[in-house]
Structure formats: C-alpha cells, structure tokens
Image: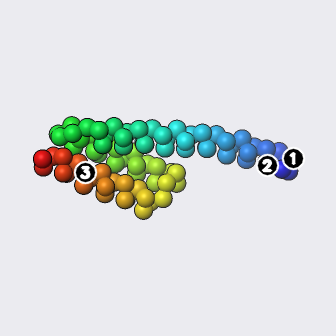
C-alpha cells in the first residue's frame, strides 16, 4: 500500500462505505425475510416498503439492478399469491 495521504484517505472512505453498504444490505435482507413470513393483507401492505429498500440498494450499487428486479418480481408473485388465497 502506498503511503500517500490521498491513498490513506481513500482506504478510510472505502471502509466507511463498506460498513454502510453491509448495514443497508443486511437490513433489506431482514425486511425480505419478514415479508416472506407474513401472510395475507399484511404482506400487501409491507410490499411497497420492501420494494423501495431493494430499489435503494440497486441505486447505491450494493446490488445489481437486474438482481433487484428479480427480487421484487419474486416477492410480488408471492404476495399476490398470498392475497389471492
């Protein structure tokens, strides 16, 4: 590792971003898990909030935009199935 001031600063910033991204990712995964556990009308109420969290992850570059689309699609199918039943 170079000993330039800019390189040291970049390392600090990368660590901060990594921690922040891990937090957002874990929080979203927990929300997805909770949404899968909920049934009926309650699932339909939570779906927009979880979809928004997934979109934010994609916007920040934590996950790929197509992975975000796949996650939202799978969740929407599950929620629609629950509401119909």
Q: Residue at x 73, y 45 (%)?
A: 11
Secondary structure at numbered mark 3: helix
Residue reaching furthest bottom? 66
Residue lying at 37% horizontally and 54% vertically, measured from the top left = 71
Q: Quadrant of residue 47?
A: top left
The answer for how far apart the CA atoms under marks 3 and 2 are is 46 Å
Residue in the foreground of this view, choosing between 37 and 3: 37
Viewer-closest of 4 and 25: 25
What is the spatial separation of the Cα atoms under label 1 and label 3, in whole angstroms? 52 Å
Q: Residues within 10 Å of mark 3 (few under 14, many from 20)?
A: some
Q: Which is nearer the eye, 29 or 21?
A: 29
On the question of residue 45 being in view, the answer is no
Q: Which mark is residue 3?
A: 1
Residue at point 29% right, 45% down? 48
Question: Is disc 1 in contact with disc 2, using a CB cutoff of under 8 Å?
Answer: yes
The single residue placed furthest to the right in the displayed view is 3
Element type at marker 2? Answer: helix
> Which circle marks residue 15 in the picture?
none
Report whether residue 82 is seen.
Answer: yes
Q: Position of residue 75 (x, y in %)?
A: 30, 51
Q: Residue furthest left?
A: 85
Residue 78 is tagged as 3
Gap between marks 1 and 2 measured at Cα: 7 Å
Q: Kindly report which numbered mark, 3 or 2, lies closer to the viewer in this rendering.
A: 3
Residue 7 in picture, x, y percent from top left: 79, 49
Tag 2 residue: 7
């Amino acid at each position: 590792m170079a000993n330039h001031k800019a390189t040291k600063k970049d390392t600090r910033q990368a660590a901060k971003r990594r921690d922040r991204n891990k937090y957002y990712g874990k929080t979203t995964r927990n929300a997805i898990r909770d949404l899968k556990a909920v049934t009926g009308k309650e699932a339909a109420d939570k779906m927009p909030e979880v979809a928004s969290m997934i979109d934010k992850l994609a916007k920040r570059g934590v996950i790929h935009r197509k992975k975000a689309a796949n996650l939202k699609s799978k969740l929407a199918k599950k929620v629609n199935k629950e509401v119909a039943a």
